[in-house]
Structure formats: C-alpha cells, structure tokens
Amino acid sequence: MPRCRYCSILYKPERPMQPGRVCNSVECQYQHSIEFLLLQGNKKAKAERIASIEDRKVIKAKLEKLKPLSYWADKTQKAVNTYIRAKDEGQPCISCGRHHNGKVNAGHYRSRGAMPALRYHHDNIHLQCEPCNSSKAGNQLEYRIRLIKKIGIDRVEWLEGPHESPKWKREDYERIESEHKQLLKELINGR
C-alpha cells in the first residue's frame, strides 16, 4: 500500500487513475489539485518567458542589421584606439614628446577623412596628447619628425604614398574590432 505524500497515511487507491501518492481524503486531493495547477501555470509562464527572450533576440539581430556602416566603423575605431593607447602607454606624445598626465588620444598621422585606407593601420596611429591632437590639429610637422624616429623613413613615406580606398563591409569592421580586442587582451595578460 502506498503512503500519501500530504498526510503520510497508508491508503488503498479507489480509482485506477488516481493521482500518484495521494490518499482518498478531500483535503489531500484538493492540495494535489492546487499544486498541479500551479505547476502547469509555472510551465506556461516559463514557456512565455523563453518565447519572449527569443523574440527579443530576433528583434535585436534585425536592429543590428539596420545600423549604418558608420556605426560599425566608429565601433571598430574605438577598439583600435583603445588598443593603441594601451600599447603606447607610458610613451611620450608622438607630436610634442612630452609625457602627459591628462587625457591622451590615439592620433592619426594621416587623418581618417584624408586617408580612409589607413584608418586602422598601426603605423598611422600613435599615442598623442589631447592638446596636440585637438588644439593643434595633430601637430603634423612634429608628428612626422618623431614618427620617422619611431618607425623609420621608409614606413613614413609609405604612409604618405597613395592608397586605394577600401570598400569595407560590416563583416570587415567586426573582424578588425574582434582582432583588436584580442590584441588588447593579450597585451594586458602579457604585462
């Protein structure tokens, strides 16, 4: 004979399909019905939550596809600049040669607008203080002098040469961003 899960008495089932481990008393049958309904309600609520999460994922994916390429270009530039600032940390400004305690930027030798092909090229981006980058428009003459000392005249002349403008797609931006996040992670772990 089974034991009731609610009142713990031994009982003999009266019906062939009587709920499992519940005696014949009205109180125990009622309690079992309430638990069953709550369980069914919880399953339904859980299924609705899962469906809602899936719907949000689909909507988010669709919204990601609608973002313009400029969004991806800027997001990638942010990842590249973060890596350059971390890589050059502790070095002086490429333009004025001073160490600054204030804000530092990842300054481009050839501007992003003038030479989009070099926008993410490491030879073209170096640590630069805020005054040189913003107030002095990059302080290009001093930048070039110190850039030659840093990477050599051949590489500077290559930067100054003609470059074909790339036709980047979203996937290219995502790949470049991912690569630079990985480089940053390796740089931080290597310190």
Image: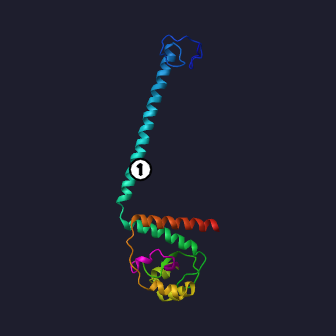
Q: Residue at x 53, y 17 (%)?
A: 22
Q: Mark 1: few, some, or many residues within 10 Å (few <14, many ≥20)? A: few
Left or right: 144, with 62 as reference point:
right
Figure quadrant of the N terminus: top right
Indicate whether residue 121 is drawn in magenta: yes
Q: Residue at x 41, y 65 (%)?
A: 72
Identify the residue at the far right of this view: 191
Q: Residue at x 36, y 61 (%)?
A: 67
The number of numbered discs placed on residues in the rendered structure image is 1
Residue 83 position by quadrant: bottom right
Q: Can residue 169 be seen by looking at this rendering?
A: yes
Whole-percent x, y for residue 170 in the image: 40, 64
Q: Residue at x 55, y 86 (%)?
A: 152
The disc labelled 1 sits on which kind of residue? Lys
SS class of the residue under badge 1?
helix
Indicate whether residue 94 is drawn in magenta: no
Figure quadrant of the C terminus: bottom right
Left or right: 93, with 69 as reference point:
right
Residue 161 position by quadrant: bottom left
Residue 96 sits above or below residue 30 on the image: below
Whole-percent x, y for residue 163 in the image: 41, 81
Q: Say which residue label 1 marks.
A: 57
Front residue of 127 and 183: 183
Whole-percent x, y for residue 66 in the image: 34, 59
Q: Magenta segment, which residues? A: 113-127
Colour theme: rainbow
Whole-percent x, y for residue 117 in the image: 42, 77
